[in-house]
Amino acid sequence: MYAVDIQGLSKDYTVGFWKKQRRPALRPLNLTVATGETFGFLGPNGAGKTTTLKLLMGIIFPSSGSATILGKDFHDPEIKRKIGFLPEQPYFYDYLSAPELLDYYAQLSGVPATTRKQRIGELLERVGLSDVGDKQLRKFSKGMLQRVGIAQAIIHDPEVVFLDEPMSGLDPAGRREVRELIQSLKDEGKTIFFSTHILSDAEALCDRVGIIYKGELRGLGVVNDFRSSVAEKTEVIWLGAHAMSAVNGLMTDARITGDTVRATLQSANLDRALEALRGQRAQLISVTPIHRTLEDYFLASTREEEKEVVRQ
Amino acid sequence: MTSRLSAITLNTFREAVRDRVLYNLVLFVFLLVASAPIISQISIGMEKLMLVNLGLSSISLFGVIIAIFVGIGLVSKEIEKKTLYTILSRPVRRWEFIAGKYLGLLLTLVVNAFLMTVGFYLALLIFTNGLKRADAMLLVAIYFIVLQFMMMVAITLLFSTFSSPIFSAIFAFALFVIGTFGNDLRNFASMSKGTTKWLATGAAYIMPNFASLNVISQVAHGQAVGGNLVLFNTMYALLYSIAVTAAAVLIFERRNLK
């Protein structure tokens, strides 16, 4: 059984007052997330990530398709006892204190009164807010609010946690704290489905990622698959500018500082380049593979799309 | 279900209290205290009549103003601030949210009216040389005012599910004014003919009728209110509120919360 199984879920919006036109926000999406997996849903702003999460949470209704969460229809209110959700840039009832807010959400999620107080205390400790007391949320910083947001998403100990841009708008320290919290949820064996446009976060946390662009899923797989699908490059540094002529055709980029040459080449050309340099008696200083990031794959796939549009 | 409903109800009440909605009580007390010397000067022997009219009208007006200005934001504010996202992602049915919001604002208004009533009776005690048995009839007028709140909360909540706060306020206030002259609309319908009669009768049934809930003048003059009217008004306010709240639920159940 999949934790999340999305089958052809789509959402169209009608735009225009007189001439009504349908604008697809999400094209039919097929996606599965295994139990215990940490899945990253990547895409630029406006790609359809939040739309997908809002559909799964029942905040908006799909134009077509269906989905199951933990084997049950996603509209079944009872399944919502087993899921937690952190919306993008969350705003909470700012007249409440953090314990009051968590108590409210715990009641709505059906946490028994006998365990609520203890659970709230534990959770505030876990997200580093045990000392906030009765301070109202309107006095909280953005990072503190995000931590409250994560606490409310897991107050009822859900099996699947959906997080929409959990690190967005946070400073580096805040991002690190949230990343550690997600990592701890992952260690507990929870299924995590989180959307982000910050690719390094996805690389650090995700078992598998899906890339969505303009409402359409463009790629799906483990992070290393995406990395290897981007042509690998290697940086070679040597002493002896005279050897440049022998490797000229093999390099994609080169910079010369005095007698030192710093060149980049396709990894496939590395052996030929090293042979040529030895032949020229150049003194090799370093050979470093350049690891391509998810960002490279992401940018490559979206640029291809843009080029195609320009060609048309 | 009851736990979720009571949680939403109490949170709505708490929001109103923390947003200082009950501060209107200070204004109410000020109004009663400040008007007392003026009343005694301008209407010798009529102090009680004036005080009852002023007190009960204030309880009604303050409540209606709160019902409109808090009610218009009950749903729309939650959509705008996206607090609803964290509610609907829990096992909360949309109708539970609407019902909880309705009960929460009604609770606020009932508590507000109760505190005002206490203040009003204190004022009567102080300014009119003690209370009489007939003064208990004033409670019937206050009960009718609460019935009016039930209907107004349902109306503002309905507008809040599909309209912006400013338009909701305009629509709700317009309905309050129309409802205040509800009997005139019925009289007009009964005197009309043809299509006009048909339309006016339809409008008279759809629009709220607050006129029959207003017995302030009657009780101020010491006249009793019949048991039939109490029963009829209770049934009318209950059915009207349920129908309008059901319409709010129907709209909200289908709404995409962008």
Image (spheres, coloured by chain):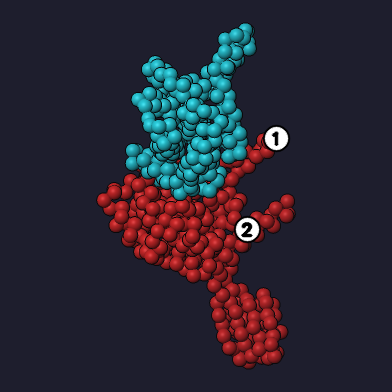
Chain colours: A red, B cyan
Which residue is label 2 attached to?
A: A302
Above/below status of B171 relative to A252: above
Give the residue drawn at x 46%, y 52%: A95
Amino acid type at image mark 2: Thr
Q: Looking at the rendered structure, which numbered label has been put on residue A19?
A: 1
Q: Splitting the image into 4 quarters, where does residue B139 fall?
A: top left
> In this view, which residue lies farthest toward the top?
B193
Left or right? Give the position of A154 relative to B192: left
Residue A226, position in %: x, y?
Answer: 53, 63
Assign a secondary structure to mark 1: loop
Residue B62 shows in this picture:
no
**How many residues crowd around disc 2 within 10 Å: few (fewer than 14), some, or many (20 or more)?**
some
Residue A257 shows in this picture:
yes
Give the residue drawn at x 40%, y 32%: B129
Q: Nearer the viewer, mark 1 or mark 2?
A: 1
Give the residue drawn at x 66%, y 86%: A261
Assign a secondary structure to mark 2: helix
Residue B116, position in %: x, y?
Answer: 44, 37
CA distance for labels 1 and 2: 31 Å
Give the residue drawn at x 63%, y 77%: A264
Above/below status of A152 relative to B225: below
The chain containing the residue under callout 1 comes to A
A248, A305: nearer the viewer: A305
B249, B134: nearer the viewer: B134
Tag count: 2
The chain containing the residue under callout 2 comes to A
Residue B90, position in %: x, y?
Answer: 40, 45
Amino acid type at image mark 1: Lys
